[in-house]
Image (cartoon, rainbow, N blue to C red):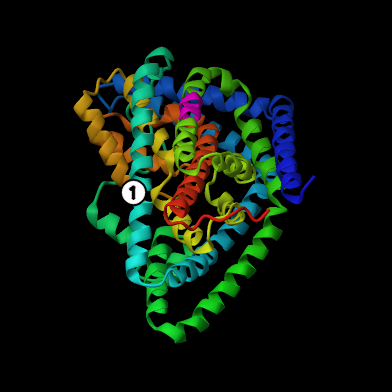
Amino acid sequence: MSKNNRLTFFIFLALVLGIGLGYYLNVQSFSTYNDHIAAADTKVKALDGQILKVKDTTTTVFAELKAQKSAAEKLRHENEAIREKKLEPLTLLSDIFLRLIKMIVAPLVFSTLVVGVAKVGDIKAVGRIGGKTMLWFISASLLSLVLGLIMVNIFRPGETMHLPLPPSNVDTGIHKVALSMKDFISHIVPKSMAEAMATNEILQIVVFSLFFGVATAAIGEKGQVIISFFDAVAHVILKVTGYVMNFAPFAVFGAMAAIVAKQGLSVLSTYALFIGEFYSTMLLLWLVLIFIGFTILKSRVFNLMNRMKEPVLVAFSTASSEAAYPKTMMQLERFGCKDKIVSFVLPLGYSFNLDGSMLYMTFASLFIAQSYGIHLSFEQQITMLLILMLTSKGIAGVPRASLVVIAGTIATFNIPEAGLALLIGIDPLLDMGRSATNVIGNSLATAVVSKWEGELTEPLD
């Protein structure tokens, strides 16, 4: 078994063992806490309904209901705190791995992108590659959004699940983002490179790297020193990546065990219809993307998908696209993509080409509307699609980021934000799938742009 296949095997084994341990803990150790949390949740929802019926807020009845709600919420928080404390040894494993990945991503993106842009040379060549890259990104994003729109209208999961709806005053804990051009520009253009690196703002790092790389190429001979330096830095970071990836199976084990211990396998049966319809839609997106890749890359697309097994497993298990970034970069270069294309396209993809997240956003937004019995016209759905297209750009490739965008979008259409409560419980399970899809989408984008540029060589191994 080769080194790559060995690591993939251990990650998959850790996935299975994590689910097994999580189920055992859920049944044996956490059932009491989970029952208390579920009972408290049910009581809070019932009290919310009663509180809404009270017209006079000065009565003793209102005060008693509020006191009962506070007591139920306190009980829920206490049990959640105990459960989280007991899960710390498991969550610590995934936290360490994700922190190590975040430690690598910013310097890796900066060093490789500077070298990539500088090697491309003049600004015209950068513009040409950038144009082809954005053409793919916009097309893939629209495809994902439209597919989600079509399938959620066919399946109509919100109408068939018959879920109890939360009261409109429920706090979901998700803070919405407003669609502001000023905020959008502020998010793209960095005011400090050090701040962008410290906060892992990939899009801001990309913008600074583009300027730095073009300027390095423009100064000619003197720029070769800079290129050589950052090329060496990139190779060092990739070596560090190899060390970090050895910890991936432990992280996967801890993440899966913690999720199943908290949620239990019962969450799959409760939301089986919605989860099944979402994952089948996502599988359809995979097939469509691979088919489009096949028309351009021919049979080599299957070799590419085979190489992406490990990054996809990492992204799926940790529910983070960023966690798979370094390994995706290494596999693309081994596939035959030139480093200058990989280091240019892949970082941009993590801000502009999150296909799985785009699919989820239309699917989830319309699911919430259906759950409330809110009918959106065709024109409104198209408007929602375009708003999601804009607000999702630059979204972080980390857990629950999509919910923030959804919260801001559904409010525009007078859909109660409390509907997000329907998704929060199963969001980790959905996040794993969309993170894996993001990896597939970005790897295909990089390979296709390499092919269009005539920079796709034979595989290295």
**In this orientation, which residue lies closer to the viewer: 414 or 200?**
200
Lateral position of residue 422 relative to residue 337, left or right: left
Lateral position of residue 127 relative to residue 17, left or right: left
Near mark 1 (Cα within 10 A), the count class, few <14, some 14-19 or many ≥20, is few
Query: Does the magenta segment cover residue 268?
Result: no
Residue 451: image location, x then y, percent: 46, 51
Q: Where is 58 relative to 388, above or below?
A: above
Q: Main secondary structure of the magenta part?
A: helix
The quadrant where residue 372 appears: top left
Tag 1: residue type?
Leu
Seen as rendered, the residue at the extreme bottom is: 222
Residue located at (51% from left, 77% from top) = 227
**In this orientation, which residue lies closer to the viewer: 52 or 360?**
360
Residue 367: image location, x then y, percent: 37, 24
Residue located at (49% from left, 43% from top) = 438
Does residue 167 appear anywhere in the picture? no
The quadrant where residue 305 appears: top right
Does residue 278 appear anywhere in the picture? yes
**In this orientation, which residue lies closer to the viewer: 366 or 31?**
366
Residue 442: image location, x then y, percent: 48, 47
Seen as rendered, the residue at the extreme right is: 1
Name the residue that disc number 1 marks.
135
Residue located at (49% from left, 50% from top) = 447
For the record, the magenta segment spans 278-284
Residue located at (37% from left, 14% from top) = 159
Element at badge 1? helix
